[in-house]
Image (cartoon, helix red, strand yellow):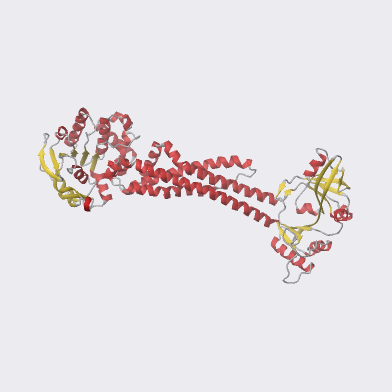
Amino acid sequence: MLGTTIILAFRAINRHKLRSFLTTLGIIIGVAAVVTMVTLGNGATAAVREQISSLGANVLQLRPGQGFGRGGGGPRPPDFKPADLTAIQNQLTGVRAVAPMAQSSGTAIYEGNNWSTTVYGTTASYFEVQSWKVTSGRLFMPEEEESGRPVCIIGNTVRTNLFQGGDPIGQRMRIKGVSCQVIGALATRGQGGFGDQDDVVVMPIKFVQRRFTGNRDISQIMIAVDDAYDTSTVQQSLEDLMRERRQIKAGGEDNFNIFDTKQISDTLTGTTTILTQIVGAVAAISLLVGGIGIMNIMLVSVTERTREIGIRLAIGAVAGEVLMQFLVEAIVLSCLGGVIGLLIALVASWAIAPLMQVPFIFDLKVNLIAFFFSAVIGVVFGYFPARRAAALNPIDALRHE
Amino acid sequence: MSVDPIITLRGVTKVYGSGATEFQALKGIDLDIAQGDFVAVMGPSGSGKSTTMNILGCLDVPSAGELLFKGHHVETLDRDQRALLRRRYLGFVFQGFNLLSRTSALENVELPLLYRGEDKQTRYDMGMAALDKVGLKQWWDHTPAELSGGQQQRVAIARAIVTSPDVLLADEPTGNLDSERSIEIMELLTDLNRNSGITVLMVTHEPDMAAFARTIVHFRDGLVERVEKGLAG
């Protein structure tokens, strides 16, 4: 009986091709919208995760104060001292590399060009923590770090703005009025979560402290955790160590914070996932509207085909068969719409993903759910018109004009 | 013609509506339809002939009284059971042809076979045989819009007889046709009655058409007025 009704459904759809297409258009658009949105959203999430992992995986950032700000009222929490750095290097287990940071900003000048940028004072470990390499030149020598020589390694943005096409290695430029020699040029990292990562000049920390900040304070310490160790365990022992060193009493609040890049990653990907879900939900509403469209046309179809239903009942169709016929017709229509919608979504997200600079990720689960949902819509919105058709009295139906 | 009746009505009444709008369409009908008979049902409109045909065709049930088909009570069957009975034993021809539009003659004729669950080849063979019987074999792939009124009615008859029913019920089968086509249809029905042994029940208001029948039943005011032998009887 099901085979028969499927044949009948395809015949009915085939007889009214245009109407069938228009009926199912809502489902086509709905499914295409949902799947395209979710596919692109997943791509965006993957892109964000990719960008954040470029900040360095398993990196802990130790800063004074609470959170990103330096705290509200009260005295400003002290920066870290060189002894803190030594303590972390010597007393903490599971640490692969530790880099102190002192920050400043100023104008870099080379010949007629000048460029306002950020100056990082740090050690060669910084590049290891960040997994960042030089494309030409070299990193700091230990003796350059030790004595704080005026040498610098420049990011790609600084390089293009000061040296244009020329080779910067060995050239002398001025930064904040002090002359320094360029010894290395860094690989391009592009836009990160915190602006242009390539707009930077990196110098030995001792030089920055002596000439720019005027003290030996360290504003931030970056710690790369060894892959063999659990980041949260290392984070906990780092917190214990710093509380002890900064003499915070039991129960007192930390006057520093430790930021795990994995946390940032989770937060940001969480945000894009929520956005994907919201956009997907909006698109799902259009799928619902598509279902109502099917119900609408099926109800009209039942009225229009009242005589046909009368004939079928008179020649011996039982009510269940008429119900099945119209129900199957609605399901076939919505499933066809679902398949066409999926194909459109596939082409659309494949074409749009490069424009949005996100990877195209085909998610079978999303496609299956969308198709299943379109079938369910056929059942739900097809049932009411089908029941109405099956309940018709054959005599009245035959007399229907 | 002294064979067992195939359909029997005993004290059949039919009441539509209730209270002030109550209308008694049938006021107690007793009627035997003999196996192999060709019965014409006549009467002015409102005389109850259509109501009677609906009951004889098991499309409707009496308000009171008995309806026996081959000796079995039909008035106690439910809607689906009556549908199965129609599917198995009855064929219908309607006044307005009532073919499915945009559907070929063959597909229209195959329709009852679909509900019987016949396979594709059987449907094709039986459908073509039925179309051959009404002389439309070569028109099998034409839709109703491409056929004349007489041809459409012959397709409808092919659809009614494709299952080899015991009884063929025709409601004003010539109502929409000119006299020449009407006579062709009546000759076809007569042939099916005589040579295929199908019992034919036909509603008509044209005495010319009733003349083809063996038995003519006259209705008036919800009662059987008289039963007479037709010219063919």
* Image location of residue A14, percent across then percent down: 40, 37
Residue A320 in the image: x percent, y percent?
33, 49
Horizontal relation, residue A10 to residue B155: left or right: right
Residue ranking furthest to the top: B180
Camera-nearest residue between A234 and A46: A46
> How many numbered circles does the render carry?
0
User: What is the quadrant of the C terminus of chain A in the image?
Assistant: top left
A329 vs A243: above or below: above
Q: Is residue A312 above or below residue A241?
A: above
Question: Residue B84: x, y in percent?
Answer: 27, 47
Between residue B184 and residue B65, name the one nearer to us. Answer: B65
Residue sitting at 59 percent across and 41 percent down? Answer: A350
- Whether residue A6 is visible to the viewer of this picture, yes or no, is no
**Direction from residue A33 to residue B111 in the image, left or right:** left
How far across and how far down the image is residue A40, in percent?
59, 46
Q: Nearer the viewer, residue A134 or B200?
A: B200
> Where is residue A225, by image quadrant?
bottom right
Q: Quadrant of residue A165?
A: top right
Q: Is residue A247 visible?
A: yes
Specify the quadrant of the image occupied by residue A317. Answer: top left
Farthest-out residue, front: B20
Q: Is residue B185 left or right of residue A140?
A: left
Above or below A60: residue B136: above
Q: Residue at x 68, y 55 (%)?
A: A264
Q: Going by the image, does A190 lie left or right of B70? A: right
